[in-house]
Image (cartoon, grey):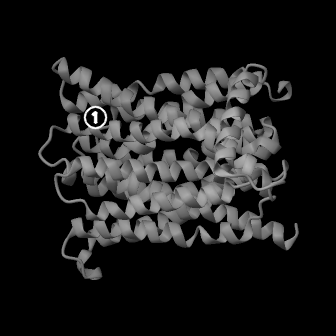
């Protein structure tokens, strides 16, 4: 492999190192805890869980509606890097602004979290779409896994620093843990921006045949989306895979976004939950790399099935969990497959789609993922509120909500079994 090719792969992969700080410190770690204990102080845990679910679903809905159009526009204008930078800046600004939100101001926290999440997810559309340009079909499993592995390592390192800040705020000249959490939001924005630079410098994007005006891009994107929607019924393999992915990634994203909130609803200590998430990051780093090699050995689709089986068992275990020690066990188990199922799904999709229309098709891929992120959290929140209204306790209502995720993994796995890569 030539030096420019290696630099492009590392530059692309380091963006996962950059923006995974948001996924770990904010989305999975501090935001759910801070939302329940600081911004929603004094509320019934079931109600704060429902509000957090709405925040996640609102962010998913916005990006789901925009994703296909953004992808098609970027393909026409050869502007993947520009769109990625724009959304990354939105994510950084929203994240850093969370440090300014005072106690009890949950609507402001929701608004900024939605903006930051849209920036995070929107940037990933164009990040994913650049994968076919930096990796050949033979390399795609390993390069996709490298990105997720670096994401776990980079996100985990900053998360470890942030956790230390909250545990020992005086070491950093901070008055208390709440101030440390707010400073952590600032560090995420800085980290995200710093490690986005290698992608901007080292990943090359083919120039458009002719410059296009914003109006022309919007019109071309709209026309292309309509055309792709008409064509999708002829792309049976892609259509089936997207349906399967929609269902099983719903369960995966729900686990990522709601795990800490679920643990708090069961009465587990927030410090233990945060440490368990940190453990997930460092288990996830070698595990994601291992899935890259596993995909080339046993096949990408079989690797996805393996991860789905683990998630099925984890969900059933979580619905019966009672102690922090069990939560640590769940964290390790999830760390073994979380990056793997994401990396293998992305790599498998690359093998199915037309490479010259990558951003457009990844727009639909991300749209499906974000619509899943709408249904999953609302499912947990809705089931929890329903059983709470029937007179069940908060903890038992939360258990029913988590148990219902099993159906998503089963349905997604069955549909994936119907996908035939050679029939695309």
**Residue 202 location in percent, x, y?**
73, 70
| Residue 234 visible in this rendered orientation of the protein | yes
Residue 276 visible at all: no
Q: Quadrant of the C terminus?
A: top right
Residue 209 falls in image quadrant: bottom right
Name the one closer to the observer, 277 or 180: 180
* Residue shown at 82% from the left, 71% from the top: 4
Instruction: Examine the rendered structure and indicate whether residue 297 appears above or below residue 6.
Output: above
Instruction: Name the one closer to the observer, 313 or 41.
Output: 41
Q: Residue at x 47, y 25 (%)?
A: 406
Give the x, y percent position of residue 329.
42, 47
Question: Residue at left 84%, top 52%?
Answer: 136
Residue at the image point whose x is 61% and y is 55% from the top? 83
Q: In this view, does 246 lie to the left or right of 275?
A: right
The image shows residue 92 at horizontal and vertical percentages of 45, 62
Q: In which quarter of the image is residue 316?
A: top left
Identify the residue at the far left of this view.
42
- Crowding at mark 1 (Cα within 10 Å: few <14, some 14-19, many 20+): many
Q: Which of 418 and 108 is in front in this view?
A: 108
Quadrant of the image occupied by residue 295: top right
- Residue 346 appears at what percent x and percent y? 68, 43
In the picture, the quarter occupied by the N terminus is: bottom right
Question: SS class of the residue under badge 1?
Answer: helix
Q: Which residue is identified by label 1?
A: 50
**Vertical side of 345 occupied by 133: above or below:** below
Q: Taking 235 as reference, is 411 left or right?
A: left
Furthest-top residue in this view: 390
Q: In this view, does 366 lie above or below 191?
A: above
């Amino acid at each position: 492999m030539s030096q420019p090719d290696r630099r492009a792969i590392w530059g692309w992969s380091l963006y996962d190192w950059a923006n995974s700080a948001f996924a770990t410190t904010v989305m999975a770690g501090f935001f759910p805890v801070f939302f329940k204990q600081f911004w929603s102080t004094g509320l019934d845990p079931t109600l704060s869980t429902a509000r957090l679910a709405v925040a996640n679903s609102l962010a998913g809905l916005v990006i789901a509606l925009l994703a296909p159009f953004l992808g098609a526009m970027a393909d026409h204008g050869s502007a993947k890097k520009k769109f990625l930078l724009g959304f990354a800046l939105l994510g950084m600004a929203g994240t850093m602004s969370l440090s300014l939100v005072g106690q009890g101001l949950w609507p402001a926290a929701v608004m900024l979290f939605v903006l930051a999440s849209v920036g995070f997810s929107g940037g990933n559309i164009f990040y994913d779409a650049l994968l076919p340009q930096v990796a050949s079909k033979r390399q795609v499993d390993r390069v996709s896994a490298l990105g997720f592995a670096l994401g776990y390592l980079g996100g985990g390192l900053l998360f470890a620093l942030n956790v230390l800040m909250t545990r020992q705020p005086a070491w950093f000249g901070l008055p208390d843990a709440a101030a440390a959490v707010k400073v952590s939001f600032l560090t995420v924005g800085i980290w995200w921006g710093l490690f986005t630079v290698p992608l901007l410098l080292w990943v090359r994007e083919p120039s458009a045949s002719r410059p296009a005006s914003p109006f022309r891009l919007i019109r071309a994107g709209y026309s292309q989306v309509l055309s792709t929607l008409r064509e999708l019924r002829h792309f049976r393999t892609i259509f089936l895979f997207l349906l399967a992915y929609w269902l099983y990634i719903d369960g995966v994203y729900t686990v990522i976004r709601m795990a800490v909130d679920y643990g708090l609803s069961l009465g587990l200590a927030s410090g233990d939950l945060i440490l368990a998430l940190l453990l997930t990051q460092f288990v996830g780093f070698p595990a994601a790399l291992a899935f890259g090699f596993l995909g080339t050995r046993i096949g990408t689709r079989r690797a996805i099935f393996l991860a789905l089986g683990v998630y099925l068992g984890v969900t059933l275990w979580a619905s019966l969990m009672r102690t922090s020690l069990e939560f640590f066990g769940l964290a390790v188990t999830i760390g073994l497959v979380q990056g793997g199922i994401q990396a293998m799904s992305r790599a498998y999709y690359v093998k199915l789609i037309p490479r010259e229309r990558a951003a457009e098709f990844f727009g639909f891929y991300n749209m499906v993922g974000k619509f899943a992120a709408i249904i999953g959290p609302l499912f947990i929140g809705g089931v929890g509120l329903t059983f709470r209204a029937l007179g069940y306790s908060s903890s038992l209502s939360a258990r029913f909500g988590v148990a219902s995720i099993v159906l998503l993994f089963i349905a997604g796995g069955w549909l994936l079994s119907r996908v035939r890569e050679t029939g695309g």
